[in-house]
Image: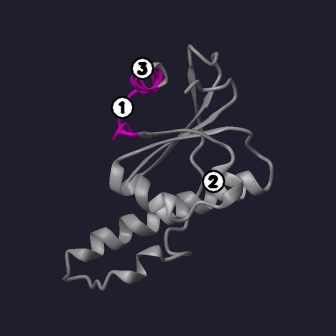
Amino acid sequence: MLIPHGTLVAVADGSGLSLYRNSGTEIAPKLSPLPTPKLDPHSKDSGKRHRASLANPDSHIREEDSLAAAIAEWLNQQALEGKLEHVAVVAPAKFLGEMRRNYHKALQAKLVVELVKDLRERPPEQIEAELKRASAS
């Protein structure tokens, strides 16, 4: 799938979120970094189905699930307020799955691509290459 000019590209994983805007073309994306919004992963605890304590390794899963929910909520808000026309989401499979559980219909309507890859710590050029590869298939 092509990545339209102006698309917001959200690259996420269990440790955070990186945002980019496609300042290139649909077939030749050029990602420009954007400031990362302040997220409150505890505002919506999607991880409540996990029983966790500080001594329990499930607390890490709960934190990741809460972060995924917080990122989805931020994207939902952007979609509902009309602050984005198109969005691409790049995240590892489990994290993306948790984000999807929290997508609003307004956000779903603006999704142009979801890429199942762990690329958050990668340079923009590598993310661009992966998006191009996904577009070609």
Q: Quadrant of residue 23?
A: top right
Q: Residue furthest front?
A: 137
Decide if residue 95 is on the left or right side of residue 44: left
Q: Residue furthest right?
A: 82
Secondary structure under tag 3 reads helix
In the image, residue 115 above or below residue 72: above
Secondary structure under tag 2 reads helix
Q: Amino acid at mark 2?
A: Leu
Dot 1: few (<14), some (14–19), or many (≥20) neighbours within 10 Å?
few
**Residue at 29% from the left image edge and 76% from the top image edge:** 59
Seen from the viewer's position, the closer of residues 115 and 14 is: 115
Query: Earlier along the polypeptide chain: callout 1 or callout 3?
Result: 1
**Residue at 60% from the left image edge and 42% from the top image edge:** 35
Q: Amino acid at mark 1?
A: Arg
How far separated are the C-alphas under marks 3 and 2?
23 Å
Q: Which residues are magenta?
A: 116-134
| Location of the C terminus (image quadrant) | top left
Percent across and percent down for residue 13 are 38, 50
Query: Earlier along the polypeptide chain: callout 3 or callout 2?
Result: 2
Q: Quadrant of residue 70?
A: bottom right
Callout 1 touching callout 3 (CB < 8 Å): no
Q: Which residue bears the numbered disc 3? A: 129
Q: Which residue bears the numbered disc 2? A: 75
* Mark in front: 1 vs 2: 2
Which label is found at residue 94?
Answer: none
